Image: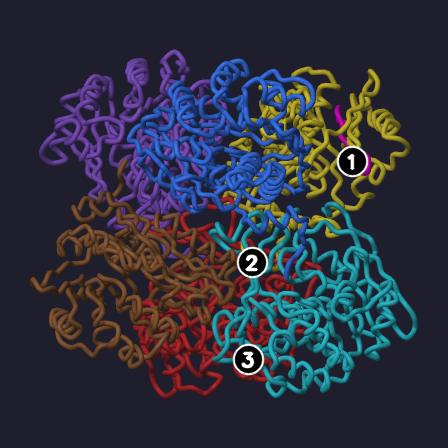
Chain colours: A yellow, B red, C brown, D purple, E cyan, F blue
Amino acid sequence: MGGITTFGETMVRLSPSPGERIETADALDFRTAGAESNVAIAAARLGADATWISKLPDSPLGRRVAGDVRRHGVDPAVTWSDEGRQGTYYIERGSEPRGTNVIYDRADAAVTSMTASEAPTDAVESADVFFTTGITPALSETLRETTADLLETASTTAFDLNYRGKLWSPERARETLETLLPNVGLLFVPERDARTVLGAEGSAEAIGADLRDRFDCEAVVVTRGSDGALASTGAGVVEQDAFAAETVDPIGTGDAFVGAFLSRYVRDASVATALEWGAAAASLKRTIEGDHAVITEGEVADVVAADGTDIDR
Amino acid sequence: MGGITTFGETMVRLSPSPGERIETADALDFRTAGAESNVAIAAARLGADATWISKLPDSPLGRRVAGDVRRHGVDPAVTWSDEGRQGTYYIERGSEPRGTNVIYDRADAAVTSMTASEAPTDAVESADVFFTTGITPALSETLRETTADLLETASTTAFDLNYRGKLWSPERARETLETLLPNVGLLFVPERDARTVLGAEGSAEAIGADLRDRFDCEAVVVTRGSDGALASTGAGVVEQDAFAAETVDPIGTGDAFVGAFLSRYVRDASVATALEWGAAAASLKRTIEGDHAVITEGEVADVVAADGTDIDR
Amino acid sequence: MGGITTFGETMVRLSPSPGERIETADALDFRTAGAESNVAIAAARLGADATWISKLPDSPLGRRVAGDVRRHGVDPAVTWSDEGRQGTYYIERGSEPRGTNVIYDRADAAVTSMTASEAPTDAVESADVFFTTGITPALSETLRETTADLLETASTTAFDLNYRGKLWSPERARETLETLLPNVGLLFVPERDARTVLGAEGSAEAIGADLRDRFDCEAVVVTRGSDGALASTGAGVVEQDAFAAETVDPIGTGDAFVGAFLSRYVRDASVATALEWGAAAASLKRTIEGDHAVITEGEVADVVAADGTDIDR
Amino acid sequence: MGGITTFGETMVRLSPSPGERIETADALDFRTAGAESNVAIAAARLGADATWISKLPDSPLGRRVAGDVRRHGVDPAVTWSDEGRQGTYYIERGSEPRGTNVIYDRADAAVTSMTASEAPTDAVESADVFFTTGITPALSETLRETTADLLETASTTAFDLNYRGKLWSPERARETLETLLPNVGLLFVPERDARTVLGAEGSAEAIGADLRDRFDCEAVVVTRGSDGALASTGAGVVEQDAFAAETVDPIGTGDAFVGAFLSRYVRDASVATALEWGAAAASLKRTIEGDHAVITEGEVADVVAADGTDIDR
Amino acid sequence: MGGITTFGETMVRLSPSPGERIETADALDFRTAGAESNVAIAAARLGADATWISKLPDSPLGRRVAGDVRRHGVDPAVTWSDEGRQGTYYIERGSEPRGTNVIYDRADAAVTSMTASEAPTDAVESADVFFTTGITPALSETLRETTADLLETASTTAFDLNYRGKLWSPERARETLETLLPNVGLLFVPERDARTVLGAEGSAEAIGADLRDRFDCEAVVVTRGSDGALASTGAGVVEQDAFAAETVDPIGTGDAFVGAFLSRYVRDASVATALEWGAAAASLKRTIEGDHAVITEGEVADVVAADGTDIDR
Amino acid sequence: MGGITTFGETMVRLSPSPGERIETADALDFRTAGAESNVAIAAARLGADATWISKLPDSPLGRRVAGDVRRHGVDPAVTWSDEGRQGTYYIERGSEPRGTNVIYDRADAAVTSMTASEAPTDAVESADVFFTTGITPALSETLRETTADLLETASTTAFDLNYRGKLWSPERARETLETLLPNVGLLFVPERDARTVLGAEGSAEAIGADLRDRFDCEAVVVTRGSDGALASTGAGVVEQDAFAAETVDPIGTGDAFVGAFLSRYVRDASVATALEWGAAAASLKRTIEGDHAVITEGEVADVVAADGTDIDR
């Protein structure tokens, strides 16, 4: 089977136009989104085989989620359920000084009751890399256990810390993550989360080295927003600048980074190449509405080669 | 204070355009709706003082609901809560042979924890008529108790049976309703619900008389869709035909009927007049998108006077 | 020069989607419309040379009106003015029992101050037919005089009675029209207006004969909506059934009829042919949003030849 | 492998809103459509494994087509090409007396150069049923040959005559089809096409028997629009009424019929059941915008069981 | 009663999308707006009791205006009129070098005939602060008198100079304002208007002191766009910087400033706090489409506390 | 006759909203565009008589193109054809680092078969200036010949080099252009194209002098994007800075420059004035969606006079 297998919740995403508010909008943009399916979509679009494992309500909303994932070439390995809701989030995009506001309405989603036995074992075990994020164990006690089980089952694992303050406190997050990360081979962590949640200190390089050491990871990728990213591996440190971007929609940028990284990683590209593709995909994602990196290998290669043009005609 | 006070849940309403499906739609029409606020809105727009009692999450979604109600002249008597969701429903409008599909996502709404002590006593006690529907007690055990308490507190009460098969079984509904209806003065009941839930039999007239007798109501209004409506009172039976309508959106038709009926009822209009306004408002509602009867007294009067014209210019 | 010259006001037309109401709509459909430019557009699209005379404010709104007329091949002979507004109307499309509601906001339009000296004499005198409607003299005393002057100046004249109850009373209309109609050669009159305004009586045929006699017209075309139309000429009476139509937007139907009639009339087609094209164009207009008959000669010919098909592929 | 494999062109579909015209519309609805992928989509959504074979330009337009097909669960077996266009069609939806107008812009589509060697042999040979339509061989001489080759290669074949007068004359169509149909096991043919193109005569039943005989088909399904359908098989004739439908968009109705029929056929359902599912899916498709039958097995089963309701809540 | 009472015209606001022009747009964004109701809305949303006095046509357009005001918690004290139009303005949003263009179509609005006797005396007399702007007396001679009368009637008064060059000349404005300002306690004045209209000179501080002296005001707030604002009071001068903002729609920024200022002022907050809330609300308004400050107390408090975040999730 | 006559292809232009991608968009913005009609539109809107010569399919798409051109005051001199497609292009607007992507779908357009004999000789010969661009001869061998013929026929000629790398290679372009340019009086050339295609070297000034010399032009205008433009004439060199602009849509900027330049040039304005109007119109175009310079003489004059204001009300 091989390829990339991700596991997590995908939500319905509802948003008024930029500049409009939920209090007065007459229509909402209707999309779907979830860190783990976002990653699978980016990877699949960049040439990887990708499977996404989750549990969805057997309803038009659940089917919508599966269809959106499938459209981009990801195989949805879904357990259909008659119980539990479809997780939902609302997003009001702001501009300075009004921050973008995310309103989660994801309690009691069908996925929160998903056990390891409901996941297709083969897709986990035989994956070239099994991926999930720190959002999943934050959603329910059951998912915490399932995450732990699947990370143990998989042979090669990747994990994005992805701390969400609206889901749990830094303390609760740390407690859980410290039990999970020893089973993680490749850790992605935003520098800020490393500090807030894991109590890491010092430079990004120091953080990378510290976490790699602490959790015995094969590699730690510290992401730093517009300051780029840095990978700490046994062979040393690789740094990558962010590519400049004029942002249309920032949501999903980190997932595009990880998906593109993994798409090269499973092809045994160098860490430097994987970082470069991650950074390029992230900058492209910023120019696109919605969580999904609706991009092509050619576009990423063009950014990497700095081959952007204003208008191509 | 006086006027009409209603009590119940108001939801966010999300719908793709007619002919589009949730599985593939890119945008959803965004409105709000709830039987009891729909009734208050219809009544307020037709000249009554109207208050709507509920509990909402202190969020943009909750504020949206309150603003929509206020816009039409209803006073929202809202308990703002940090717990509980904003109830939501999705609607896919169908045409033959595909029925319109309503997908409720209303579990754990803030209102489900509302107790009688959270309701403004004055708005209940001093109302000319206090109104709720059979949806409210179906939403939670707490709301069942609150409904019972408020119906006891109020001096004049009206109730629309409004059976929803997606919320409870006919048996459970009947059990609860039989404890509530003895405190109801004016009962609205769709003929079909009277049969399914209350086990009434015979003609609409027989049903009206039976229920009035069984629950000691002042009046029972049996609504019969395109077959009109019928009021059974101590003074006898009054019948009302439905007005012909070319339907744009059928949702909310029954609430427009009740709101218009009550708007005349609190002015001591005759039952015949109240029925006529109810039927006229219901037919007008059918021509308008959304649950709300965005109509005027003049428009209802024109329908009653059969004064429609094709184009008025 | 030749061709058809029309004279009158063209307004901005603002409308919510069908089923939406002005009280709650968030966007309005934005078009332009006016009986006399509608007629010119229908005629031009069906092959006639057409000129439209009017006066517009020198503003984006005025330029919008001129551009829309030009787009369909009509030559706008416009006096640009720094005074006076752009006439506007709002339309809320209804369905039974709620009639479509037209809200005029046309007082003090620039055109209301237009004198005959501001009109291009050549376009009036040399027209194969000069056309205006009963709306124009209703708009201002000045326009009443201008209308009278231009009808006297033109050699061949056509006129659509087009009574608008929101502009003047039947009595005032009759008084004015009785001074104008003696200068009209070809009169179009809705049967209802003939009765209400001109006091005509009897059958449509009797009305046609009576009015032709009374005002010494060359021909009188009595239009009867879904009952078709009838022309009373010196050579006798010609009748024409209406073509069946599934109506999307009824506004502008009468203007399409007149424009198509005139497009054949100036080619010396028979009255029967002109009536047939009028009726066919009217039925096509009903299938199209907006006042304009965005149709082709081929489409009209197909309807006349009863050559409609469900789907042509 | 098994399942249903279809082969043909899928186009981009551009359409103004109903009532708007291409001459004046400011936006076009943007979808994709093609008889053979429509059939695959309907079948896949109703539970069948489905593969669609085609050739697409390696461009955003080509990728859009593949993504839309995949979204509904069909496996797109696409040859990506640097030559040839993306086929396109425009559709202006009409209402009486203006017929719906389809404007093809499909010349030189990438698929027109597709040879049998470019098709995945396995997906053709091992399919439970291989399906294409009379549109495909009409598109190019190369496609005529490819169609012939693939029909020979496949073990079980189905074919929808689908005559398109805008692509070829009845005479040319007949000439080609008479060489292809001997390799067809299951023939779907609109009654009108059977007469126009194949010169069949007599009742629908007679036509079915005649064609089955003439081309030695296992079964011939004669479709008759609102008059239902009829299957002529070795075991006799099975008739099926059409289900009543309020039509939103008629395009794709026939493809939904065939796709649903095949979805049951590959499960060895009886011809009567396959016809019933075909008819039910066709009626459901009519209620949905676009060519695709965005429906579920549950919905079809409800229609078959006559279990429609106005509003389900 | 207490709270804030404002008085003035509210218009319908029609605008094409940014980048579109009135000459070619097919749809217009449909909102309502007016300096005095904007101020009332901002104040009400930030916790103040607010009433807005005006006169509206008894039409769907007039009702739309009242409903929009009510939606945000303002009590509309409206005199409904059968005469006079609904004031309207069109706005084409530009970007450098094309300035945003406002096209007023507000002549003969119903409000222009409003007399002091039509205003609810109680709402004026008992208001904690009565507010209007320099737009109102510019609209008609009658409104000039009404403004003067109400400013005399009210006990505490606030006034925003709000000079509009499209309504009157600086000379005419000055003449009128010099008769009104002696009755104003709290004067808001854009620095540029102070110079152009009132002939003030020197620094902003000097202007504040000069005007306070000249008109015997309690306080003068000089607003300076991106340079902030400054209050000149008996206790000295308070300065406030503007908060940085990425502007979506600048219209209504000044009104948000005043509304937020007054919301704190009527709570006896310090001038410094009122200025800070004014500046924060103004910056938030810039991020929102339309004239209305659809904001919350929490959001203003966050800006004041510099607690913006990019994305809150 | 006089005025400006242009000759070339006009396409349908389809684009998703900025931030949306063709792969996932549900609707496309629908406009028309072509360098030569864009130039005619800009010139006509700025007061010149303008005619546009082309060949279009006799279809709704062809009529749409003609209507759009006419709307802005240009006379479309169109040969209607039953053969050939309507040229089309898709545009995906990007932001850094994703360049705006233009996808041409213009092969086999009706215009590609247009011969000089199909063009109205009078409109070419009697034009004050005849204009076309380097796009036209790139479209087909026939058009190469037609372009050569018409440039020879016309007395005064202008030409914009407009190199399109998606249509031909620099070598092929150079070969053709070197045969055409000797018949060109006024040459517009982007500095980059002069280098890439014509092999010009040195400063912009040197390039202008070189090309004027090489092709014996009356004047050469070298355009340099945000660096402005420069005209090399017999009387010396005139330089013009670009006006600052906040870009909404860059497409069509060069055409607006040329159209405005020509609108002054045919009025015998100085080269300096023509350049200034060109630069001002180009900056205004950037603020407007679509290829067309929907601008007025007043707006251009304001930019030239640096009389922009933020908001004019």
Q: Mark 3 and mark 2: span between their CA atoms?
A: 24 Å
The chain identifier of the residue carrying mark 2 reads B
Q: Nearer the viewer, residue A13 or F258?
A: F258
The region drawn magenta spans A183-193
Numbered badge on residue B49 = 3
Q: Is residue E152 above or below residue A272?
A: below
Q: Is residue E176 above or below residue C230?
A: below
Q: Position of residue A20 (x, y in %)?
A: 62, 54
The chain identifier of the residue carrying mark 1 reads A
Q: Nearer the viewer, residue D61 or D267?
A: D61
Foreground label between 2 and 1:
2
Q: Residues within 10 Å of mark 3 (few under 14, many from 20)?
A: many
Q: At x 50% / y 73%, what residue is drawn?
A: E85
Q: At x 83% / y 73%, what residue is drawn?
A: E211
- Indicate the quadrant where residue E261 lies: bottom right
Horizontal side of residue D206 vs B195, given as left or right:
left
The chain identifier of the residue carrying mark 3 reads B
Instruction: Tell if the residue under mark 3 belongs to the same chain as the one under mark 1.
Output: no
Q: Residues within 10 Å of mark 1 (few under 14, many from 20)?
A: some
Q: Nearer the viewer, residue B278 or E71?
A: E71
User: Mark 2 or mark 3, which is nearer the start of the sequence?
Assistant: 2
Question: Where is mark 2, residue-wise?
Answer: B12
